[in-house]
Structure formats: C-alpha cells, structure tokens
Image: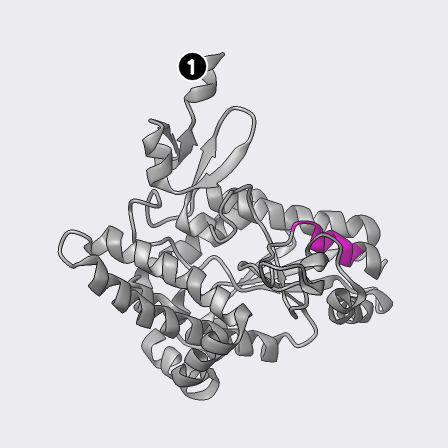
C-alpha cells in the first residue's frame, strides 16, 4: 500500500535535473529508485499501520504576487481553486488505497515573508480568509490551513517574524555559501531570484534601472529563502511525522516531494504568480502578460476576475 501511495505522489512531482550529464539522480526523474522513496515510505508506514489518515504538509498559498502584470488581483481566483481541488483529489485518490484516507495541512506562508516580497499583512490576511471560504464553500474535507499565527499565537506579525528569524532562520551568510556549493540550493535561489526580479520590474520598472532591480532582488531572494527555510523548520517541528510536500521543484533524493498543482510549461510557476488560461479543452497556468499577448479575454465570477479564455481555438475552428 505504501508503495502504491508513494508512487502516486511521485507521479505529479516537480523535479529539477541534477546536471546536464547523465546521472543516477537524473535517471530517478522518470523512475524513482529505492533511495528516493525510502524516507517517504517509512512515514507512510506509520499512518497505515495505525489506520490513521495519512498526513501531508505543504508550505504554499502565501498571497498573490504584487506584480499586476503577472496576476489578476490580490485575492484567490480560478488558479487557487483548481490547485486546491487538485490537492483534495490527491487525498481522494489515496483514499482508494488506504481506507482512512489522507489530509493535507497547507502551511500558508504569506505572513512569513510578506514584508520581504512587498505584500502587506492585511492583504495576506485577506487572501488567507478568502482561501478558507473557498475550501469551506467547496466542501473539501481533507484540506486545512495553518499559518504563522497558529504556530506562535497572536496576530502581531512583525513580532512573530522576529521570533521566527531569531529562533529558526539560518544565517544569510550560510545560505549564500550553500548557493555557491550546493546545486539544489542554487537551483532554488535562481528560481526565487527570477520571480523577485520579475515582480520588481512589474512594480518599479519605470523608476529604477534593471541592474539596480536585479541586485536588489538578489538580496531579497536570499532573505525570502532564509525565511522560507525557517518556516520549513517550524513545520517540521510541529508536524514531525507528516510527509513533506513542496511547491518548488525538488531533487529526486530530497526529503520533500515537489507537487504540480496545474498544467504549466514553467516548472516554477504557481497560481499566486500566474493566471489560468482556458483554451476550451484544458486549463493551463501562464503569466498574465502571456495571456494578454494572445488577446485572451478575462472571465469574471462572483464580481471578481477569475481567469482568461484563449480565443485562438475558436478562431481556427
């Protein structure tokens, strides 16, 4: 049973290749080896033998990007809805093999680094409240939200971030060394840096040079990863037996499994950094500017922009 479930989890994983050459880790992308699966299988055994719901944790769904050339607004839209639905479907599928089913704790990390990425705490709070309403309205029983306030208590987020940094964050100098020496950390840094630079260009592009923005976003990327690592340590401490999922691509031998929420050509793209494009046959995640390039139209639902419709299939049919 654990073998079937871990293979299911790996089926929709996000991976990065260890190098350009042929390596054992690269081979594991298409066919996970025993070393890939062993840590996850051991955790699955704990829940299966006790006939308990399998517990998975996913730090994700922080807040919408402040870059309005990438997203439709501050609140969740069809991207979040489809992403959450995919997580519920994953739990449903696990329930086919394991009668007790599964549950996912979404460790929403917007308050963890909102000040670093330029999203105010009240905007993060509004985003999370909307997520909670979405989960309740859709009646997804296997999903729950957990945030910085749940971990430390209270809503004085600057103070809570201070506690997080003081007690859990690795030194930035240590992180910079890891970026230079470890391919996994370097891959993560490059992905986060790209997003930070895109957001900086979208927000300040008309007033600051791209070189200055690139340098600024590099330092912010280090701070974001430092905070993210600190939050990851909190999550591991609070949920030590849970299977660790990640929204970012992971090495095949990582202790985390990278999960893909929607179809997208960009392995790093998430619902909070993009928009949904409906071409009439499938839903894909793209950046807002890419939808606008093809003159896609915005669909509104419940008084808010929801997603884009791709006009090209209709024009060629």
Residue pushed farthest front? 21
Q: Work out which residue is located at the far left of the displayed protein and give it.
A: 207
For label 1, the SS is helix
Question: How would you rate the neighbour count of disc 1 (Cα within 10 Å): few for under 14, some for 14-19, many for 20 or more?
Answer: few
Q: Residue at x 79, y 65 (%)?
A: 52
The residue tagged 1 is 315
Question: Residue 310 location, x and y as percent?
Answer: 43, 26
Q: At which x and y percent is residue 189?
A: 44, 67
The reply, left or right, for residue 228 in relation to residue 75 is: right
Give how far across and how far down residue 300 sits, in percent. 37, 31
| Span of residues in magenta | 5-12
Q: Is residue 274 above or below residue 150?
A: above
Q: Is residue 140 visible?
A: no
Q: Position of residue 231 (x, y in %)?
A: 49, 74
Q: For residue 32, what is the image quadrant?
A: bottom right
Q: Nearer the viewer, residue 283 or 94?
A: 283
Colouring rule applied to residues? one colour
Magenta stretch holds residue 122: no
- Left or right, 20 with respect to 90, comes to left
The residue closer to the viewer here, 33 or 63, is 33
Specify the principal SS of the magenta part. helix
Kindly identify the residue that appears in the image at 64 percent across and 49 percent down: 88
Residue at (52%, 51%) from the top-left corner? 267
Which quadrant of the structure image shows residue 115?
bottom left
Using the image, determine if residue 146 lies above or below residue 138: below
């Amino acid at each position: 049973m654990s073998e079937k479930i871990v293979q299911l989890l790996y089926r929709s994983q996000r991976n990065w290749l260890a190098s350009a050459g042929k390596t054992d880790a690269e081979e594991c992308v298409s066919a996970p080896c025993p070393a890939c699966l062993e840590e996850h299988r051991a955790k699955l055994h704990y829940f299966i033998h006790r006939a308990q719901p399998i517990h998975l944790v996913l730090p994700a769904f922080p807040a919408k990007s402040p870059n309005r050339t990438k997203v439709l607004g501050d609140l969740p839209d069809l991207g979040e809805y489809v992403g959450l639905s995919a997580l519920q479907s994953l739990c449903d599928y696990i329930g086919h093999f394991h009668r007790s089913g599964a549950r996912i704790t979404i460790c929403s990390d917007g308050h963890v680094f909102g000040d670093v990425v330029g999203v105010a705490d009240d905007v993060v709070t509004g985003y999370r409240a909307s997520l909670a309403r979405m989960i309740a309205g859709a009646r997804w029983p296997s999903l729950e939200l957990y945030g910085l306030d749940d971990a430390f208590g209270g809503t004085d987020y600057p103070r809570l971030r201070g506690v997080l940094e003081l007690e859990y964050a690795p030194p930035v100098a240590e992180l910079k060394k890891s970026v230079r020496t470890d391919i996994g950390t370097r891959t993560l840094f490059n992905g986060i840096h790209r997003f930070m630079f895109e957001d900086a260009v979208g927000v300040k592009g008309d007033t600051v040079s791209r070189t200055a923005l690139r340098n600024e976003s590099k330092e912010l990327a280090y701070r974001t990863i430092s905070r993210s690592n600190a939050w990851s340590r909190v999550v591991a401490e609070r949920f030590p037996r849970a299977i660790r999922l990640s929204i970012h691509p992971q090495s095949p031998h990582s202790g985390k499994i990278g999960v893909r929420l929607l179809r997208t050509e960009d392995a790093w793209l998430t619902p909070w950094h993009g928009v949904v494009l409906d071409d009439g046959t499938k839903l894909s995640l793209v950046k807002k500017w890419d939808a606008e390039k093809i003159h896609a139209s915005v669909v509104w639902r419940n008084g808010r922009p929801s997603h884009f419709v791709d006009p090209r299939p209709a024009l060629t049919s």
